[in-house]
Amino acid sequence: MTAPGEAARRKPVRRPTIKDIARRAGVSESAVSFALNDRPGVSPRTRARVRQVAEELGWQANSAARALSGERAGAAGLVLARPARTLGVESFFLQLVSGIQEVFATRTTALLLQVVEDLDAECALYRRWWAERRVDGVLVVDPRTDDPRPALLTGLALPAVVIGGPAAPDAPVPEPEPERGTGLRPPPAPPPLSTVWADDAGAMARILDHLHGLGHRRIAHVAGLPGLAHTERRIRSLRTEAALRGLGAHQIRSVTTDYSDAEGAEATRRVLDAAEPPTAIIYDNDVMAVAGASVAAGRGIPVPGELSIVAWDDSALCRVTHPRLTALVRDIPGFGRLAARELLTVLDGGPPRSVEGELPQLEARGSTGPCPAH
């Protein structure tokens, strides 16, 4: 038999209501509603009294009721449609979210984060959030080369900021000879969606400058997920930058993966098994670069004596691996802060625009060296 005291302890705590505030403050429920929603109809003294009582009782506005009244939900959404197994080992999104949350905290805006299986599930979630008025706006990551999300969000009139920028106009990447020219910077996002983006072409040019200057002429690229706009931009940028330096298409190779260490290692084996293996490999994240270095060590290929390795994004992994990995260094939390500020600007009525993040710097470390003589 349950003791009375134990039953009382198990009884859930009831949330305070407007009726409770009205009873404690000695005013009508309508007066409480006016005071808490900052509407005219009550005196400053009554408004202060109601708010003091609400704070004492720990009252918070119900998000559904607030949404129905036309007020903001006080939350922004972020959906990740990537294989869950890859998110646990990649530091990029953790750093991005930390920057986003840093800005949102200054405005008491909650971040609603959800991981889904695919793009269809992501779109369905946006529709549900919109119908339930769960979020005021969303941050959209991993733009696709053929992306249904901008049109969907525009149709729903759900404010959004795209992180990563649009695809190049002529994506996806064709197989023939790479086109020449420098028109690879992503164009400004068309209204009504804002975008924050990084110059992948400029970053790739810095990597190629470094490797080409060391004498490397056969270069492989272990890329990320196919269909992502930034994957296609990096592949195209590699080919274009290589062509500008006099390298032929047969000297450059890109292999797409799911960003995981397993697929990064497998892609490394494939390119090293080629008739003319590369003397340098560029990896689209730190996890795959470390996996590639492990494959090279297992085959007795010295880094950088026989193979140079570059990671697209720097992390603690790159700095503790031996040798330390040459990597692109950028302020990922700062990129998250930039995106969060842009979304808040949009929610405050600002116009849609295209905002460029800072260009990453290449930090040369022990994993890159002169091309070996053959």
Image (cartoon, helix red, strand yellow):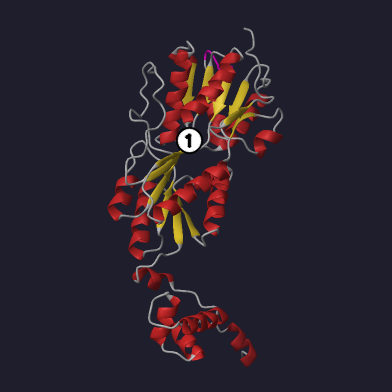
Question: For the point 59% across and 14% down, which residue is it?
Answer: 213
Residue that sits furthest to the top in the current view = 374
Residue 77, picture quadrant: bottom left
Q: Is residue 98 above or below residue 290?
A: below
Percent position of residue 65, x then y = 38, 73
Assign the magenta stretch its main secondary structure.
Answer: loop
Question: Of the residues shown, which amino acid type is indicated by label 1?
Answer: Ala
Screen quadrant of the C terminus:
top right
Q: Nearer the viewer, residue 38 or 260?
A: 38
Percent position of residue 64, x then y = 39, 70
Q: Is residue 237 above or below residue 214?
A: below
Question: For the point 49% across and 27% down, which residue is it?
Answer: 202
Question: For the point 43% across and 19% down, which residue is it?
Answer: 240
Screen quadrant of the N terminus:
bottom right
Percent position of residue 89, x then y = 59, 43
* 29 relative to 370 in the view: left or right: left
* 104 relative to 347 in the view: left or right: right
For label 1, the residue is 198
**Residue range highlighted in magenta:** 275-279
Is residue 240 a member of the stretch shown in magenta? Answer: no
Marker count (numbered): 1
Q: Nearer the viewer, residue 63 or 27?
A: 27
Q: Nearer the viewer, residue 54 or 330?
A: 54
Residue 231, picture quadrant: top left
Q: Is residue 254 above or below residue 23?
A: above
**Circle 1: is it few (<14), some (14-19), or many (20+) Cα within 10 Å?**
many
